[in-house]
Amino acid sequence: MRKSFDSLAGIVLNQLGKDPTCGEVFIFLNRRHNQVKLLLFEGDGFAIYYKRLEKGTYEIPSPGADSTSLYITSNQLSWMLEGVSLRSVKLRHRFTLPRKMELQI
């Protein structure tokens, strides 16, 4: 979790093959899942949100086989940061336009 703006943007560009200025939120977790960094480009520069839990861990959705990244919704991100168990959440069917964020694991 020592990486900052340029290093995280480099990971997004070189390892994920994505443009870090595209407007998506890129989420990075440490191995113990008790620290998270969110990288986003706000039009005039990068912003980083960083949080370290004093107790507990972040639960993330299971990625597919041989996958190092997955897309999550803004609701899932909010629940993840608030400590809601994503496995126990049941959503009723609603129409929504696709709006997703990429989670780097």
Image (cartoon, helix red, strand yellow):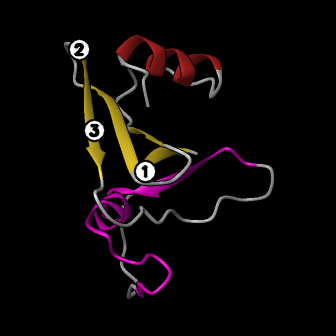
Q: Is residue 80 magenta?
A: yes
Per the rendered image, the range of residues in magenta is: 67-90
Q: Is residue 65 above or below residue 44?
A: below
Q: Quadrant of residue 50?
A: top left
The residue nearer to you, when weighing 55 against 83, is 55
Cα distance between the residues tagged 1 and 2: 21 Å
Give residue 15's position: percent from left, percent from top: 65, 24
Q: Amino acid at mark 3?
A: Tyr
Q: Residue at x 27, y 45 (%)?
A: 51
User: Which residue corresponds to mark 1?
Assistant: 100
User: Crowding at label 2, few (<14), some or many (≥20) Cα neighbours within 10 Å?
Assistant: few
What secondary structure is marked by label 2? loop
Cα distance between the residues tagged 3 and 2: 16 Å
Count of labels shown? 3
What secondary structure is marked by label 3? strand
Circle 1/circle 3 CB separation < 8 Å: no
Identify the disc placed on residue 45.
2
Q: Residue at x 26, y 66 (%)?
A: 82
